[in-house]
């Protein structure tokens, strides 16, 4: 006979699946762009857990598109090669030697690790970069930064072709230049926002190493309007590394993304908590569209 505690666990699991049904129905066919980065990328178990969540999203009828970063891996290889990095206003100056390393790490090592992790969980993933099919065309973001790009033209049909064929695209944020076929390094959040906007995605999930946007008391703000986000940037509540994520969220909403969530990628099953529960995860930024139910926290 099975222990009673095990029966309770299975009942709880069944109840959770049942309660998720409205959300599973809500997101059938939805495009969800997920920016994956931070410490989880260097942790084998966290990578496998993330990959399993992405495969489940695809299995229940969603169209996930993964966009990734890879800053720590870039730093490691630059150090090994003796290439010094300079910084301007917190951003890496990317010269020709550096952008070659960036492309090698992002389009090669990091991209293929994520692809392999998804395939190992039973999914079908294909890794590409923003250069493939001229998906992401950039101009210099700031002359002082060298080959750091700002997307000015998006051609995302290749992504639609992939997910319509049941394949999960995994995108490295490396792009071609608008002039002379230069290669540009693009901030991962920026690239994810541009891709989500071009796809008119239902959701953009920005996974990071913090719980979400916090108010002055240090509490995570679970729902915000664009005007509230702008106010928090203006008064300094949103500061430092959260500013680019918040600005990416605002731009994505302007370009037609239904909602953006900034959430902690270190939390197990963070994407599933956000998409398939009343509780949600992290900070939801949206204009007018209501959730199925208000968040419980």
Image (cartoon, rainbow, N blue to C red):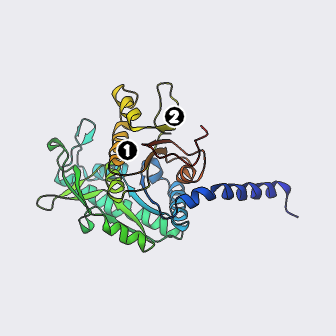
Q: Residues within 10 Å of mark 2 (few under 14, many from 20)?
A: some
Residue at (26%, 63%) from the top-left corner? 155
Mark 2 or mark 1, which has the lower sequence index? 2
In the rendered image, which quarter contains the C terminus?
top right
In-front residue for pair 50/65: 65
Residue 251 place in picture, x, y as percent: 32, 45
Q: Residues within 10 Å of mark 1 (few under 14, many from 20)?
A: many
Vertical placement of 260 versus 230: above or below? below
Vertical placement of 74 versus 52: above or below? above
In the rendered image, which quarter contains the N terminus?
bottom right
Residue at (39%, 51%) from the top-left corner? 257
Identify the residue under disc 2. 220
Secondary structure under tag 2 reads loop
Residue 294 place in picture, x, y as percent: 58, 42
Identify the residue under disc 1. 249
Left or right of 193? Residue 57 is right
In-front residue for pair 30/110: 30
């Amino acid at each position: 006979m099975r222990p009673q505690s095990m029966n309770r666990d299975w009942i709880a699991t069944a109840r959770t699946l049942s309660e998720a049904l409205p959300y599973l129905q809500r997101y059938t066919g939805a495009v969800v762009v997920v920016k994956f980065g931070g410490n989880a990328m260097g942790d084998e178990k966290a990578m496998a857990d993330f990959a399993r969540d992405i495969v489940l999203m695809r299995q229940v009828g969603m169209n996930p598109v993964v966009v990734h970063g890879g800053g720590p891996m870039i730093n490691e290889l630059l150090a090994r090669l003796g290439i010094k990095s300079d910084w301007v206003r917190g951003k890496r100056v990317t010269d020709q030697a550096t952008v070659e390393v960036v492309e090698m790490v992002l389009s090669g090592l990091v991209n293929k690790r994520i692809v392999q992790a998804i395939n190992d969980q039973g999914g079908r993933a294909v890794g590409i970069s923003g250069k493939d099919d001229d998906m992401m065309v950039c101009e210099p973001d700031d002359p002082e930064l060298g080959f750091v790009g700002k997307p000015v033209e998006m051609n995302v049909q290749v992504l639609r072709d992939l997910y319509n064929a049941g394949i999960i695209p995994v995108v490295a944020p490396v792009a071609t230049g608008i002039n002379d076929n230069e290669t540009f390094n693009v901030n991962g959040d920026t690239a994810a926002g541009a891709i989500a906007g071009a796809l008119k995605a239902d959701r953009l999930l920005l996974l990071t190493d913090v719980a979400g946007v916090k108010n002055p008391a240090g509490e995570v703000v679970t729902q915000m309007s664009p005007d509230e986000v702008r106010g928090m940037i203006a008064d300094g509540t949103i500061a430092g590394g959260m500013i680019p994520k918040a600005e990416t969220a605002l731009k994505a909403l302007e370009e037609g993304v239904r909602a953006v969530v900034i959430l902690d990628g270190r939390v197990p099953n963070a994407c599933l908590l956000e998409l398939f529960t009343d509780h949600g995860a992290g900070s939801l930024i949206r204009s007018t569209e209501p959730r199925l139910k208000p968040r419980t926290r």
